[in-house]
Every structure is written in C-alpha cells, then in structure tokens.
Image (cartoon, helix red, strand yellow):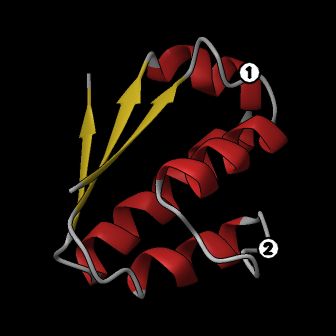
C-alpha cells in the first residue's frame, strides 16, 4: 500500500503539494500538477493507497481556497475508487 502524507504545516504552496502527491503516489510523468489531473490519477489508481491529511487548519491557511478544492477532489476520488482511503488526523 502506498501512503501519502499531506502535512499542512509543510505544504506552503501548490507546487510542494503536487510534488508530494506525485512522488509519494508515483504518478506518471504526464501528471499535470493540478486538481483535474489529480482526480484523473486517483480514480485510475490500481493499488491501495492512503492519503493522510495532517494539520488541516494549516493546510487551509497556507493554500486558502485551493485547500478546500483539494479536499473536495480527494473525497470525490476516494468515493469513486475504493482503493483510495482518505484520513485526517
């Protein structure tokens, strides 16, 4: 199982966010580093993965409205793909 930790204390911009996702989930080179591409990659993911959200308030503070959109995309992708598990601590 792949594990991706999204720590709101460390993710201070979109580039860091998408780099963390791409590296920890081994996304393909074509990953566009945007929310549409994230949804596409997650719904097409063929192995178990857990995405852990840490310090959600900091994530929202650092990324603003983008964090809310990100969480929505993650939730929708987890509903669409039973191999994706989303947790928050």
Q: How crowded is mark 2: few (under 14 residues within 10 Å), some or many (20 or more)?
A: some
30 relative to 21 in the view: left or right: right
Q: Which residue is drawn at 26% across and 80% down?
A: 81
Say what secondary structure mark 1 lies in: helix
Asked if residue 51 is positioned above or below residue 80 in the image, the reply reads above
Q: Where is residue 75 in the image (x, y as percent from the top left)?
A: 36, 61
Image quarter (top left, top right, bottom left or bottom right) of the N terminus: bottom left
Horizontal and vertical percent position of residue 2: 30, 54
Q: Which mark is residue 54?
A: none
- Mark 2 or 1, nearer chain start: 2
The residue drawn where x is 74% and y is 76% is 29
Report which residue position mark 1 lands on. 62
Where does label 2 land, which residue? 32
Q: Give left or right: position of 76 versus 89.
A: right
Cα distance between the residues tagged 2 and 1: 21 Å
Image position, residue 13 (x, y; %): 81, 31
Circle 2 SS class:
loop
């Amino acid at each position: 199982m792949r594990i991706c930790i999204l720590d709101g204390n460390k993710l201070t911009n979109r580039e860091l966010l998408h780099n963390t996702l791409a590296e920890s989930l081994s996304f393909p080179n074509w990953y566009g580093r945007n929310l549409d591409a994230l949804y596409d990659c997650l719904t097409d993911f063929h192995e178990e993965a857990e995405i852990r959200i840490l310090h959600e308030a900091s994530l929202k503070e650092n990324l603003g409205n983008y964090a809310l959109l990100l969480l929505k995309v993650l939730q929708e992708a987890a509903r669409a793909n039973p191999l994706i598990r989303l947790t928050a601590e």
